[in-house]
Amino acid sequence: MRMPRFRSIGVDPATGKEALVVARPGGPLEAPADAQALETAAVLVAVVDAVLEAGEASDLELAALVPPLHAALDECVGMIVADRE
């Protein structure tokens, strides 16, 4: 059994703090957490696409994109695994 992990359901506009939950498969918080993960991944894809199309990013700038892309990919893979369990 996997350890529960915190998932984002967005940012509170009043405080600017990220709301994190433990969303269990089939639970009421799973859908908002999934939606947030997909939205984050879509935004990252758009940013990376724009950077790559411009073709002027340094290796350091491209390397800075790796951690958020890895986190988004990990979250999406986690969603797939949870659906299969």
Image (spheres, grey):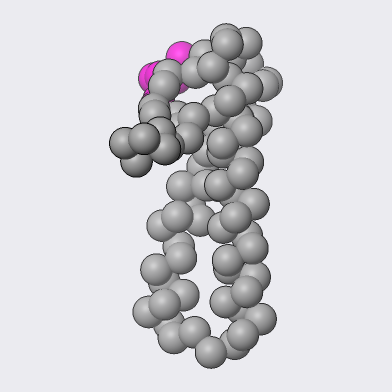
Residue 4 placement: quadrant: top left
Q: Residue furthest top?
A: 27
Span highlighted in magenta in the image: 1-6
**Picture residue at 44% right of the left edge, 86% below the top:** 58
Magenta part mainly helix, strand or loop? loop
Regarding residue 77, the answer to whether it shows in the image is no
On the image, the x and y values in percent for residue 57 come to 49, 84
On the image, the x and y values in percent for residue 22 come to 43, 19
Residue 36 placement: quadrant: top right
On the image, the x and y values in percent for residue 26 come to 62, 11
On the image, the x and y values in percent for residue 17 come to 33, 37
| Position of 4 relative to 36 (above/below) | above
Nearest the eye: 9 or 68: 9
Q: Is residue 4 magenta?
A: yes
Q: How many marks?
A: 0
Nearest the eye: 38 or 78: 38
**Picture residue at 46% right of the left edge, 14% below the top:** 1
